[in-house]
Amino acid sequence: MNRLSTLVVLAVLAGVGMFAGGTTAAEPKADMRPRLVAQLGHSGLVVSAAFSPDGKQVLTSSYDKTARLWDATTGKEIRTFAGHTGEVIFASFSPDGRQVVTV
C-alpha cells in the first residue's frame, strides 16, 4: 500500500440549492446538509480542485504527478490522469465539461 502523505477532505453538497438563492433562518433539509468525504487517492499534496460545470464531478491535481477525477456526490474516484513528468500544479475543465487540462 502506498504511504499517504495527504488526506483531502472535500465538503460535498447534496444539492447546489443552498447557494442558489437567498439565505434563510430555517434549518436546511437533511439532503441539503454538507457531507465530508475523505479522498485517499493522492499520495502527495493536493494543490488544486475544481468542480465540473454541471457540479457532478471534482477534478484535483497533486504533487504526486497525477490529476484525478471524482464523483462529487459519492466521493469515489472515477479516473486517474497519470503520465505527467512533474508535479501537476493545476487542473481545470473546459467550459462544456467534456475535456480537462493539466499544468
Image: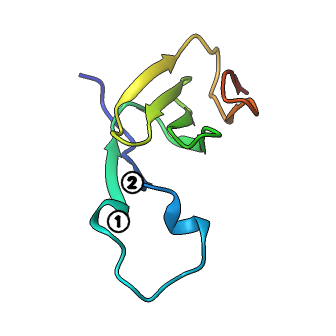
Horizontal side, residue 91 vs residue 83: left or right: right
Q: Which mark is residue 33?
A: 1
Q: Residue at x 73, y 27 (%)?
A: 103
- Vertical comparison of 65 with 20: above or below: above
State the image coordinates of residue 78 (x, y, percent, origin top left): 42, 23
Residue with the mark numbered 2: 14
Q: Secondary structure at mark 1?
A: loop
Q: Nearer the viewer, residue 20 or 33?
A: 20
Q: Which mark is residue 48?
A: none
Residues under labels 2 and 1: Cα distance?
7 Å
Q: Nearer the viewer, residue 13 or 101?
A: 13
State the image coordinates of residue 23 (x, y, percent, origin top left): 54, 81
Q: Would you call the spot at circle 1 few (<14 residues within 10 Å), some (14-19), or many (20 or more)?
A: some
- Vertical comparison of 7 with 85: above or below: below
Q: Secondary structure at mark 2?
A: loop
State if disc 1 and disc 2 touch (CB < 8 Å).
yes
Q: How is the image coloured?
A: rainbow
Horizontal side, residue 25 vs residue 85: left or right: left
**Which residue appears farthest toward the bottom when viewing the image?**
25
Amino acid type, residue under disc 2 in the picture: Ala
Quadrant in the picture for residue 33: bottom left
Amino acid type, residue under disc 1 in the picture: Arg
The N terminus, quarter of image: top left
Q: Would you call the spot at circle 2 few (<14 residues within 10 Å), some (14-19), or many (20 or more)?
A: some
Q: Residue at x 48, y 19 (%)?
A: 80
